[in-house]
Amino acid sequence: MSEADKPDDEQLPPAKPAGKVKPPPLSLSKRQALRRKFLRTVLLTGGVLGAALSGYLPMVYARRQRLRPPGALEEKDFLASCIKCGQCVQVCPVQAIKLADLVDGFGVGVPYIDARDQACDFSCDAVQCILACPTGALTYAKPAFLPVRQGTQLAAKPILLAKEKDAEPTLNLKERMGVARLTRPELCLAIKGKGFKGQARGADFKGQMRYMQVDRWKPIPIAEHPYDVAECDLCVRECPVKGAISIETVYAPDGTQRKSPVVHEPCVGCGVCEMICPTERASIEIVPREVWRT
Amino acid sequence: MNTILKRRFLEQILAMFGREPKKPVQISAPAQEIHLYKRTTNKEKLQAAAAHAEAHMSTSHKWRNRRWAVLIAANLLFVVSFYFDIQILEGALTGSRFIGFHLIDLNSALQVMLAHKHIITNLVIGTATVFVFWLIFGGRSFCSWVCPYHLLAEWAEKVHLWLVKKKLVVDQPIDRRLRTVFWLVFALLAIATGYTVYEAISPTGIVSRALIYGPGLALLWVLAMLVFEVFFVRRAWCRYACPIGLTYGVVGIFSPVRIKYTLEGCFHEGNCRKVCLVPHVLDTVIKGRAVHTEVPIGPDCTRCGLCVDVCPTGSLTYDVKGLSKLL
């Protein structure tokens, strides 16, 4: 019987007589009811805390590191400071940012980018997600007390090719999201010396990108922008950051000369190269949180 | 026809021919009973009793409907703002921007501050705005007028009560001190682990984000809690677990908006306590408990108005402290 179901006409107990009076012993049924209530309370405590702390599991069995939106604090600080509101999701013009689900444990509701599906191409120009963040989990300027890992800092503010001619051509980013790496050189069309013709990721690919020559302000689906290149250089062609990647002549281990995409220091790790790479699976990928090694 | 009525039948014929009516010689037993009852009861009392019975018959859902409308509208505004990109209310319940103004959920802000141990200006602005808003509108009003989980739990409660009526389940109450313990534990966990541990299981945040950004696996946790509430413990999460409720409850301690109890007309029937999410705040309606002729209901009250709707005597009403004096 819950408290609310008790009859309401119970009177106030008579005033206690002075001096210590031992309360009458509880009946057996009342004692049992109290014990059951206590057990239920313990059970609910265990259930809720168990559910809450199961969020630790993904932290312990850390799978692949997530690529976070630009300006994200270091992973631990990022998870702590993010309020899981998704305002960054709402401002992104290419919907690159997604919110993580239950499998991310304490990272549930925290934004990430799946670059292969939809990379951040900076078509917002001003890094809108950073501007939208209410807690500073995404930030232009890290507070002084937070550590900066060696190699995450960019040598100079990256120049966004799309607004190279503007008064302020840079993205106001100080640290990189990750670094692009040629993870599958054996697939790379440039290394094979092959060209590419057609839709970079097939007709069904939903990813979008801003093409300056098409529309400065409106990203279009990549499927609507077919390519025809004699030697594949899509990663270099579409990289939004100045001087971050180029096709160079390199020497293979057997001494022969060949062409290859080479990533340079200004790479911010936005993931456009990974998204646009026409090989299946991507020859070039972002290693999230990776530092620049000289 | 019995003899009494037969006599009256004949007398009425004589009255037709000109005889004046006389006081009856004999009256039947059931009629005498009613006459006696009428001699001892006055007309006003009878009318009041009839009106009271009638008030019990008619069930009003005025405040519940208003509240559901506000709750759905608030959550829908989040959804349409994103879906149609009209930018009126951006974000989710944990943190948002209303036409540009930062709004931050108090408990989420607390978790972030404790876990991150660093506070930035925007966070302070948003938190302060929300704090002042609920300080005025009554703390836990957030629960019943805004929180989307509250609405789901209300529906689950209906199923639970139906099952209780069918004697298929029994409510298993839990120690209410547990909520205070949870509040402290989640605060300590945020400090100790550096993660916003509570946000991982907060049904408010999970449901809000699911509405706005699409459903995810996290809804399974919410579903599990609702099933638990239907079959085992009535309103388990809101009553015994939710730290958000306690945070807003504390904010509402000095709120002018509250439910007011008037002792005079109350019949102490206790219907209000049966519909209440937090019946301990209505202990004052128990016969002999009211400490004054008018008693404001305490801060744990969610100002949901179910008691106002159900009260047949108008003894429970919405009240704004000082406003009645002003008007």
Image (cartoon, coloured by chain):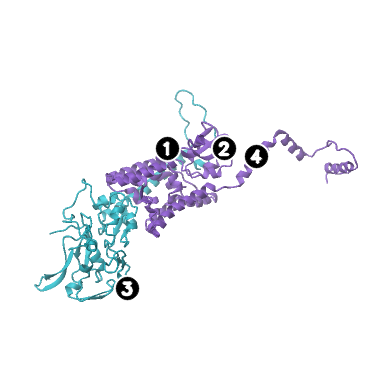
Marks 4 and 3 close (CB-CB < 8 Å): no
Tell me how far mark 1 sits from mark 3, CA to CA.
60 Å
Tell me how far mark 2 sits from mark 3, CA to CA.
71 Å
- Which chain letter matches label 4? B
Q: Nearer the viewer, mark 1 or mark 4?
A: 1
Residue B308 position in % (x across, y down): 53, 43
Task: Name which residue type carries label 3.
Answer: Ala
Would residue B236 be seen by someone viewing this image from the given angle? yes
Do the residues at pointers 2 and 3 share their chain?
no
Which chain is tinted cyan? A
- Where on the picture, by quarter, is residue B33? top right
Compared across the picture, whether A260 is left or right of B276 comes to left
Which residue was labeled with disc 2?
Answer: B268
Which residue was labeled with disc 3?
Answer: A203
Which residue was labeled with disc 1?
Answer: B253
Which residue was labeled with disc 4?
Answer: B49
Task: Name which residue type carries label 4.
Answer: Ala
Tell me how far mark 1 sits from mark 2, CA to CA.
26 Å
Compared across the picture, whether B31 is left or right of A143 comes to right
Which chain is tinted purple? B
Marks 1 and 4 close (CB-CB < 8 Å): no
Do the residues at pointers 2 and 4 share their chain?
yes
Marks 1 and 3 close (CB-CB < 8 Å): no
Residue A106 position in % (x across, y down): 31, 52
Tell me how far mark 2 sits from mark 4, CA to CA.
15 Å
Q: Nearer the viewer, mark 4 or mark 3?
A: 3
